[in-house]
Image (tube, helix red, strand yellow):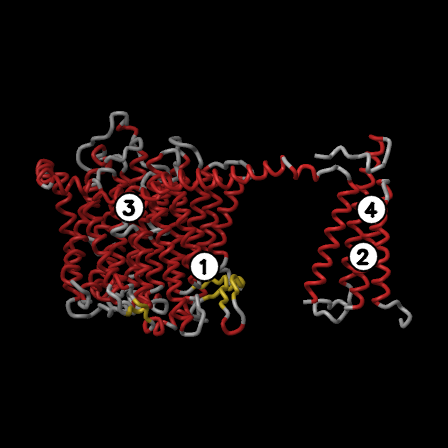
Amino acid sequence: MTSVRFIPALPLLAALFHGLMIGVFRRNLSARVAGAITVGSVAGALLLSVVSFAELIGPTSEDAIVDRVGTWIGLGIGSSALVVDLSLRFDPLAAVMCLLITGVGSISLVYSVGDLRGDEREDRGEQRFFAFASLLLGAMLLLVLADDFVLLIAAWSAVGVATWWLLGFWYRDDARVRAATLAFVLGRIGDAALIGAFAVTFWALAEAGSYEAGFVALRQASPTLAAATLEWPVWLGGGPVPVSEVACLLVLLAIATKAGQLPLTGWLGEAIGAPVGALVLVHTVTTVAAPIYLATRLSFLFADAPFASALAAWMGVTTAFVGALVSCAQIDVLRVLAWSTASQIGFAFVAIGVGAPTAAIFQLIAHAFHKGLILMAMGAVIAAIGLERDLWRMGNLGSRLWRTRIDVWIAVLSIAAALPITTGFFALEQIVVAAGVDDTLPGHFVLIALLLSAASATAFSIVRVIALSLYGDTRIPSSVRWDELEDPGPLILWSMAALAALTIGGALIGMPQMWADLLFSDIQNANSLQHFLAPSVVAAGSTPDGQAGAWSYAGLAALMGVLGALPAFWLYLQRPRMLAEITSRIGWLHRGLLRGMDLEPALHRLFIAPVLALAGRWLARGVEERVIEGLTLRGSARVVQSLAGGWLRSAQTGSAMLYIAATIAVGLGLLIFLLHASRG
Amino acid sequence: MTDAPGLDRLVALSLVLFALGMIGVLWRRNLLLILMSLQLMMAAGQLAFVAFGRAWAGVVDSVSRGGSDGQVVALAALVVGAAQIVVGLAIVIAAFRNRGSLDVEQARAMRW
């Protein structure tokens, strides 16, 4: 008896409950009650994940716990049948993801209870918030537990919808809805690409004689996938291309839309007008985490696709670099953090590209911890000074909000990757070393240079946040009384403390062996995450530990963090005039970065505007007015009218006898016809 | 049960009953009698169901419960027919109270 199915079911049931309460019974529960239900369901899922995890690492030591709920799709007969079971697989990778999602998820939900309770600013729909949050977490859990492509695609789409609703939570504001909608529309393009990736692998295996949708079967068949080829279209040069490359490229498109990677980034930086709890969920364990999970799950496919892998690494490193630079220039603190998310996820895709999927997962874990923590802490700061998000209207708040300051410091240390005590430090170390020792990548030197610069820019941007908000001279709005500033309530403080503890303690699960040898004496298998995940992933890259040059890359990464962090402090606190000088010197660059390189408007023009134009001009006036309304609706009405007004009317004599006679005559006619037809 | 009637005789009886009912429906002008004739037609149909059900027991694959399918359908039709006649009689009574006559030829208010 496994309880794996209840891990996604509990949050989904909570979402259903909230939906029924709001939609059918028209009862809005308070933040406290609705939040308690959702937190309870996610905490229950966390408990079940822990139990299943204990079972997985227990003495029976199976590869995975499989929970087969039932047959979902059955097509075809005999040996050519496609049977898709509704089946959940709790393997090491899914276990790590489940623990992460439910853990950080429940912490951020507790925060949301505290955050939304005092929220009088907009339409109060606390239960709506918790309905969407439950749906998002449930869909994400379903996504990581899915045993086959079909269920994963369904859950992937559900995550997209829930993200849309959650980011557009304050729906009366057009700008917010616009950003959320862009995220959703881009996500739909990604959904189509993902379906395409599935179709390609499915087709290739069907050619080889088996119908498979499950990940285990796909992994076993990966030699077949690598051997099978498709023809490039002629306008792309023609020639054969391996199926695994095509599938990986399609997966990359899906990933780029969902995780906000270049060139499809931009929406992440705009969609910040949501409750902070929603941002925490979207930016850490759900929407942007799903692509990393997917790439890790399909690491066997990427191992056979050198071109797509290189593309992933380059996509990741450019996003990491550009995202970090853009976040250095932003004024809105949430926008800084949002762009930094795109950048941090970019680092993870570098790891995917160089064949170190466990490093990507570790980066995801670190990101979930420290980005969740700093989002929460900055949310508390914003709430304390009357919802002011402008970094230039903060300053010296650390002396009033001293408990929050501790949390911000821990998060900043982890994101800047400057000291070897945080999860973020070791995650970045692993990625830089893995990318450093893999010199098969095209443009290896440039890639490493960009990667290290991105690390530096990340440190700069995040230290800039703490310097401008918590130190220096205070510039808070005059409407805020300095004496009344205080730390947030206990719910928020405790949830931040939990994430802060994880940010520090998480370092222990994924510490590289060479660092463990340096810091402690005699620890075997220090990188327990890597050993635990080994059965679930295919690491194409070599293990960096102990290789020549590993230490130089590790040292460089740490140095770059410090090199980014210290100038930020110095510039923003000690040398404001020099800062202004620099800003005006690079004015054009600064303005571009401030506008987020105009990526979001460009995406709008590219993907939303054409659809609207098509809908407005051609579809609305041409198709809707002329064809549907004119021809079909009014035309058919006119035909019926002319018939019914005329001779058809006279058939209605009102005489029951005639009606009966006609019925019987028709019945006899039908009988004779059928008898005749059946005789041949 | 050697002297039980065969399928052909039962079907013939059913046909005769159906024809009698149909003639009644066409010939009669009294609403009540039309209703009674309709019931006769339905009874003929149910009889055919039972007869075929018994004759084809074990022949058709789906008839695996000892040939009770026809009887089940007939019973269900019986229940539906009973409900139908209740409504029908209520309409007949209401029509009679309203118009003082049951002649269907005079009730032509629903023409065009």
> Looking at the image, is mark 2 or mark 3 nearer the viewer?
2
Label 1: state its secondary structure: helix
Mark 1 or mark 3: whose residue is earlier in sequence: 1
Residue A528, x across and y down, in percent: 32, 65
Q: Nearer the viewer, residue A92 or A220?
A: A220
Mark 2 or mark 4: whose residue is earlier in sequence: 4
Q: Are marks 2 and 3 in contact (CB under 8 Å)?
A: no
Q: Residue under circle 1?
A: A151
> Looking at the image, is mark 4 or mark 3 nearer the viewer?
4
Q: Are marks 4 and 1 in contact (CB under 8 Å)?
A: no
Q: Residue under circle 4?
A: B26
Q: Identify the mark at residue A498; answer none if there is no mark.
A: none
> Looking at the image, is mark 4 or mark 1 nearer the viewer?
4
Q: Label 3 crowding class (10 Å Cα cut-off): few <14, some 14-19, many 20+?
A: few
Q: Nearer the viewer, residue A235 or A457?
A: A235
**Does residue A292 lie above or below A38 as drawn?**
below
Q: Is residue A374 in sight in this rendering? A: no
- Looking at numbered disc 4 in the image, what kind of residue is underneath it? Leu
Q: Are marks 1 and 3 in contact (CB under 8 Å)?
A: no
The quarter of the picture where the C terminus of chain A appears is bottom right
Q: CA distance from mark 1 to mark 3?
A: 30 Å
Label 3: state its secondary structure: helix
Q: Residue under circle 2?
A: B46
- Find the residue positioned furthest to the front: A647
Residue A194, x across and y down, in percent: 37, 58
Q: Are marks 4 and 3 in contact (CB under 8 Å)?
A: no
Q: Identify the mark at residue A606; answer none if there is no mark.
A: 3
Q: CA distance from mark 4 to mark 1?
A: 61 Å
